[in-house]
Image (cartoon, rainbow, N blue to C red):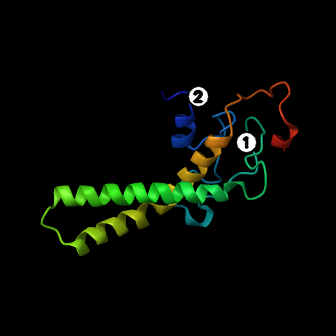
Amino acid sequence: MWRKGNKLYSIIARKCPHCHEGEFLVNRNPYALAQAGDLLPSCSVCHRKFEPEPGFYYGGMYVSYALAVALSVSMYVAVTVLAPDSTQTTRLVWVLSALVLSAPALYAWSKALWANLFIDYKGVERQPGEDAKWFA
């Protein structure tokens, strides 16, 4: 399950969606807010570009929204089950706190997830007939 060639590995580790070896983001720490979500122009290992066309990662916003909704619902259910006597205000505070604290990580994972939905694993070596648009 945790090996190169598996999309889940690439998403969780935030590695290059093409080769699963190079770094995907400028900074591995999603909480370095000055560089949060910034992508490298291309992979340092396979030299393929991460952005096939301008605006490619706008779709990642929908993924980020879906992840935030899933986190919110999970957090609300967890607080309701673990503290059944809590007020709605307390539950809201817990949900909002979880969203604020996890927002940079959700943003980074949403870009990695979006890229892995549309970019197939190819390995490090250039494949025969591979489109030149992917190379820097």
Left or right of 49, for residue 5: left
Q: Residue at x 17, y 56 (%)?
A: 82
**First in sequence: mark 1 vs mark 2:** 2
Mark 1 = which residue?
43
Q: Can residue 5 be seen in this view?
A: yes
Residue 4's disc is: 2
Kind of residue at badge 2: Lys
Image mark count: 2
Report crowding for label 2: few under 14, some 14 to 19, many 20 or more residues within 10 A (C-alpha).
some
Badge 1, how many Cα within 10 Å: few under 14, some, many 20+? many
Tell me residue 44's x, y (percent).
Answer: 73, 41
State the residue in front, 41 or 90.
90
Q: Where is residue 111 in the image (x, y as percent from the top left)?
A: 60, 52
Q: Is residue 74 above or below residue 33?
A: above
The residue type indicated by label 1 comes to Cys
- Under circle 1, the secondary element is loop
Residue lying farthest bottom? 89
Q: Which residue is drawn at 73% across and 46% down?
A: 50
Callout 2: SS: loop
Q: Where is residue 48 in the image (x, y as percent from the top left)?
A: 77, 40
Residue 136, image x and y in percent?
A: 84, 44
